[in-house]
Structures are given as structure tokens and as C-alpha cells.
Image (cartoon, helix red, strand yellow):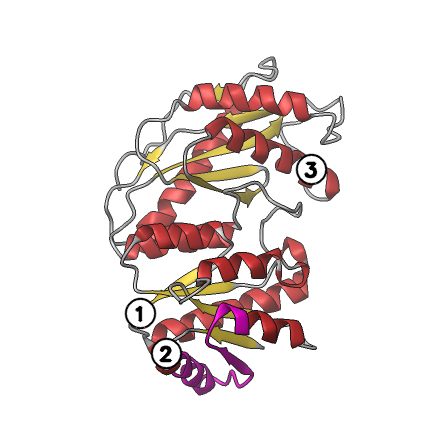
Amino acid sequence: MKIMVVDDDELVRELVRDILHMKGYRNVALADSADEAEKLIGQARIPFDCFFLDIQMPGRDGIELCGWIKSQPAYAKAPVVMLTVLSDISYVDRAFAAGAFDYATKPIVKGQIHEKAATIRRLIEGQKTLGPQAVPALAEAPRPAGMIDYLALENYVKRLSLAGLFTRQIFAFKIVALNHRGLPHAGPQFDRIVDAGARAIIASLAPRDLFLAHAGDGVLLCVARSTGDIELEKIAEDANARFAEARDAADVPHDLEVTICVGHPIRVGQVRSGRTALHSLNLAIRSATRAAQEAPMDNGAAGYYGRRRVAAGGRH
């Protein structure tokens, strides 16, 4: 695995390199700035597999560098781990919005770096073995603002929860063809339908700060980064209206009665458990799936808000 570590602090970048070496990752390049990193990337005959980037650096910071890396076709799927002291959660939000896969906190802890590298290695090996469907994600690019990979969303929720900083609201939508109780399971048509649905949902939720990820099977999981109540029934209705306008552009077959259903919100308190946070994601997914199952066949394009609440919903 070919890795790049970027940090303006020589001691930090050499420490991360040495930690990676201890686990057998010998092909590690170092850079002290975004400019040097871009230069090394441009000169590389074999692309890098992943990156560890310091967030706060003189000149262009790691978040800007992350955005640039992810904009390069050869690195669109390359995992990026941000290194941060986590003094300001807005940095973490910006990093994930720019395409970060995960983050590690400073001071650097050996176990954290080992864990990230091992996870990335498994992810890369899975992609090489199974292809792009190994991780539920949208194939279309560029993605709408706020759209991130599902595994990145899991990491975002889990890491903030472990730090006691996650107080967000989680809910999910499910895109379903009512006359078939499902969608085509894979392929370009499925990607276009889910992409159009994601764009409709994000537009309907604007201007709220949020992350949206495809959890598979047409389920779009949302983490609202702003507080306050969200009228999900109205959001679903508006999203369906926007999706209806985009049907032709998305090449949705006329025989599919596609609608966007929404589940109940899962409110997450200030917890310090990654497992509890991930359980909340699963609750939201199940709620949206149940709403789709309960949607009446003659519902047309109107949004449907499931009548039954998730038994384990509420604060966790």
C-alpha cells in the first residue's frame, strides 16, 4: 500500500511514518505542505493508495488539499484520513464535506494510526476484489454538496460520538417503485434514480447543513449538522415534486411509480459510544424501510411518513 503523510510538523509526519513502518507499510512518502504534496502526486508513476493529512497547515490547509485530491479522477476513491487536535468541530465538518474518509486525533496515538491503516487496507482490497459495488456509494460525479460515502458517514458519527461531540439528528429516506416494491438492484439505471433522488432531497433540505449517504438498496441516510425541528413530511413532498421534474433527465422508465418515502427522526443525545451512534443509523434505515413497506400503492408521487414509530427511537 502506497501512503502519503502531509504535515508541516516534521516530528509528527516522521512519527506517523515510523508507526506505519512498524506495521509493515514501508512505502510512505512525506510532504510538509499542500504544494509539496501536489508536486509528489503529479510526479508519481504509481498512484498513492491513501493519505494522512494535517488539517491546520500554513498556506492551504489539509481540508483544501483533501478537496483537491478527491477532485482528481485517479484519486476519487482514495481514502483520506485527517489529523486534527479536534479543537473545533467545524474543522471536522469541513473535512468530511471535502471528502475525508476518517480522522485521527492529535497527539498521535499508535493504535489509532494502525487501526486506520488496517481499515483502509481492507477497504482497498475489497474494492479490488469486488469492484465499485463493494461499498454502497453513488457512481455519479461530481456529487451534490453534502453527499459523502456511507463508510465515511459511519466514521463521522462514530468518531464524534466517542469524543462526546455528537448531538445531531438522524433520519433516512427510501426511494421505492411502489408498483414493484423496489428498484432495479444495480447498474446505471439504479445509479441515475438514486442520484436524482439524492439531489432532490438535498435541494429540499437546503439551506440546512447536512451529510447524506447512500446506505444501499435506495436508502439515503441523512445526518443533520444543524439543530432544530425538520418537518420531514413537507421535505418528502417537496423532494418528490423535484424528483418528478427530474424523471426524464434521469431516464426513469415510465412504468416505474417511483416515490421517496421518509422515516422518523432519531434524536441522538450527547453520547460517548460509537456502537450506540451506529445503532441510531440502523434505526433510521429501518424506519425509512418500514415507511416504504407501508406506503399505499395508490400514493403516487406524494411523500409518505410511516405511521408507526421505531420502538427504540428517541434519545440514545
Name the front one of labels 2 and 3.
2
Kindly report the distance in space between the C-alpha atoms of the residues bearing marks 1 and 2.
Answer: 9 Å
Q: Residue 51 appears at what percent x and percent y? A: 51, 69
User: Dot 3, crowdedness within 10 Å: few (<14), some or many (≥20)?
Assistant: some
Q: Does the magenta stretch include residue 23?
A: yes
- The residue under label 2 is 12
Residue 106 numbered tag? 1
Left/right placement of residue 268 relative to residue 215 reads: left
The amino acid marked with disc number 3 is Arg
**Quarter in which the C terminus is drawn:** top left
**Residue 179 in the figure: left or right of residue 267:** right
Q: Distance between the residues labelled 3 and 1?
A: 40 Å
Q: Where is residue 279 in the image (x, y as percent from the top left)?
A: 36, 46
**Number of numbered discs:** 3
Asked if 55 appears above or below 257 in the picture, the reply is: below
Depth check: 99 or 165 in front?
99
What secondary structure is marked by label 2? helix
Which residue range is magenta in the image?
12-36
Please report whichever mark, 2 or 3, sits nearer to the chain's N-terminal start.
2
Disc 1 or 2, which lies upstream in sequence? 2
Q: Which of 21 and 313 is in front in this view?
A: 21
Q: Nearer the observer, disc 3 or disc 1?
A: 1
Q: Residue at x 63, y 46 (%)?
A: 142
Residue for point 58% across, 49% down: 136
Q: What element carries label 1?
A: loop
Q: In this view, does 35 lie above or below 10?
A: above
Query: Are the residues flagged by discs 1 and 2 in contact, CB closer than 8 Å?
Result: yes
The residue type indicated by label 2 comes to Val
What mark, if any, has residue 168 been given in the picture? Answer: none
Q: Distance between the Cα atoms at labels 2 and 3?
A: 43 Å
